[in-house]
Image (cartoon, helix red, strand yellow):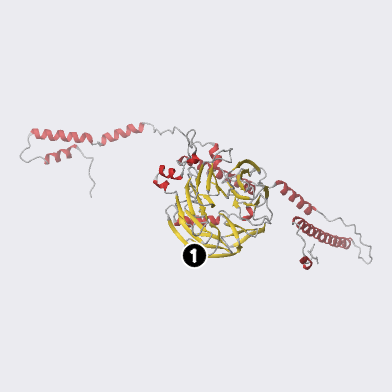
Amino acid sequence: MKPTKRYFGADAVAAKTDARQDDGRKDKSGMNESKSGTEDRLMLLPDDSDSKQTSKKRSKVPNMRKIDPYPGEAPVSEDTVKKYTKTKKVKSAGIKGKYHEHRYKQQVQATRLAATQAARAELLLREDTGYFEADEGEDTSKISQYDIADAVDITSAEKFFELHLDKFGPYRINYTRNGRHLLVGGRKGHLAAIDWQTKHLMCEFNATEVIEDVKWLHTENMFAVAQKKWTYVYDNQGLELHCLKLLDSVLRMEYLPYHFLLATSSAKGYLSWLDISVGKQVSGCVTHMGRLDVMCQNPHNAIIHLGATGGSVTLWSPSVKEPLIKMLCHRSAIRGLAVDTTGNYMATAGVDRSLRVFDLRTYKPLYKYKISAGATCLNFSQTGLLAAGLGNVVEVYKDCHKSQVTAPYMSHRLTSPMTNLQFCPYEDVVGVGHGQGFASLIIPGAGEANFDALDVNPYQTKKQRQEWEVKALLDKIQPELITLNPHEIGQIDQPAMQSKLDARSKLLLIKSPKSDFEPKHKKKGKSKTGRVESRKKGRRFEEKREFIKDTVKLRKTAAVEESQSSEPAQPKTTLDRFKSAPQTGSRVT
């Protein structure tokens, strides 16, 4: 394809126009009209001389750049940045070495940049949580679920439904972390895994054994079932993967997603933690609290909370065999226990028909409520709503841990007493398991409006789920790091470290006493200066060697005494006579 000649002279244009005229009509009038037409065409086309003149004129004009009226990055409020900051700043005064100080400053800058970018991206999150706004004199708890389903759109109305399963109940339920899948388990052996948003049944079977509790694991491909004798692990097709005989007579289960730990409490009063990534038991202890059927976890620090029949709540960590905290919350047995997502507030319900809210930062009670019946189950939503199961009535309270409330936010009556309830993550839905099946209720404002797709993604594909699983295994937190205050991990215990350094310096700086040995005078040239000094040096070496041996014995004895004093005293039994006496030191040759 030949390029078109757009720029050409006046003679060429006139020749072409003359050739287009008819052979017998070449009069002056026709020629004039054709010339005028070519002149009009030539005015639209730039000439070489004109282009050179315009280029000279343009070269004289200075190069003007656009000025940004808002230079720099968009400002972000410090409150928003503080909201997305997950770590506390550590003082760099005690860091030794310029290299480590430089590395620490780089980490601080990277953390600050991540929080700033997250705060700036908050402008893109247009979704927001909404609540019922009642008119003056109107009570929102009297609004029924059928009225809500009629008022909302079709997609939201489909979230209110009931499953009538009256043959294998009562049922316990559990949602996945992204809120997409639902697991229901009946006490008489019925199990079903459902994608509740699309109503797609993943698997359904009967375990032919009593089921105490069900729990999803790290993904929707695996779930654990606490059956009458042992605990089993199934896949999403209903195939048995593992039989955990270490976990027997389990009543309640909690899964710690960032540690890959399955915490279980049994009817024998035994609390254990199992690492599902390697299939080994991390820790376990006897609580001496009897039957453990009230259990929950703190999502902020992964501490396990247990409720006892004596009205006390104990906090447990896998690295300690004794309870970290023991609180007397009620004068009667505890039937319900829940901790909010921030880890700052804990709600307890007792048989005495009382509901109490505690501040876990000070371990003091904040508010006390008198309810119509003893709550058998409690659960906090992502936005701070508290749901309580009072027999066959579900009551939801709004901001009950921030101020004193006088009436519930919403209420719904079921056909049978409930056994379990849980708010669905990232949805305005609460799922209730009761004696005759399952009910999904619409609770406006219960779910978080925006989700972090790198952590939990309700719309993730198979490839994204696989990549997330690998990354989560690489970022797994060790169980030894589970403490009451997770921010203490990155800090230095200065008093303890200073005492250790002082003790080490004392042991290292201990010198052997000076030797006062004076060799006897010998004849025949044996008392020369060189020989006397060599005899003194050998005697000093022997005394120093004996001193070091005695020092090592003392250190070992002190270590054994310290370990014995730190261990709790155990009651003596008749079998102690067969135990060998502990060795206080090692034999030195």
Q: Estimate the x, y position of residue 470 in percent, counting from the top left.
A: 51, 57
**Residue 475 position within the rendered picture, expressed as x and y whole percent measured from the top left:** 56, 54
**378 versus 541 height, above or below:** above
Percent x, y of residue 296: 59, 51
Give the residue furthest to the left: 24
Along the line of sight, which residue is nearer the eye, 66 or 456? Answer: 456
Residue 262 appears in the figure: no
Which of the two residues, 104 or 196, is positioned nearer the viewer here?
A: 196
Residue drawn at x 54%, y 41% as measured from the top left:
408
Along the viewing direction, whichever of 583 and 531 lies nearer the viewer: 583
User: Residue 241's spot in the image, x, y percent?
Assistant: 52, 65
Q: Is residue 367 visible?
A: yes
Task: Give the structural element (helix, strand or loop) at label 1.
Answer: loop
**Which residue, given by chain and number where applicable, does mark 1 sit on?**
239
Query: Which picture quadrant has residue 52?
Result: top left
Q: What amino acid type is highlighted by mark number 1?
A: Leu
Quadrant where the C terminus sits is: bottom right
Residue positioned 27% across, 34% down in the render: 50
Q: Residue furthest bottom?
A: 578
* Within-10-Å neighbours for mark 1: few <14, some 14–19, many 20+: few
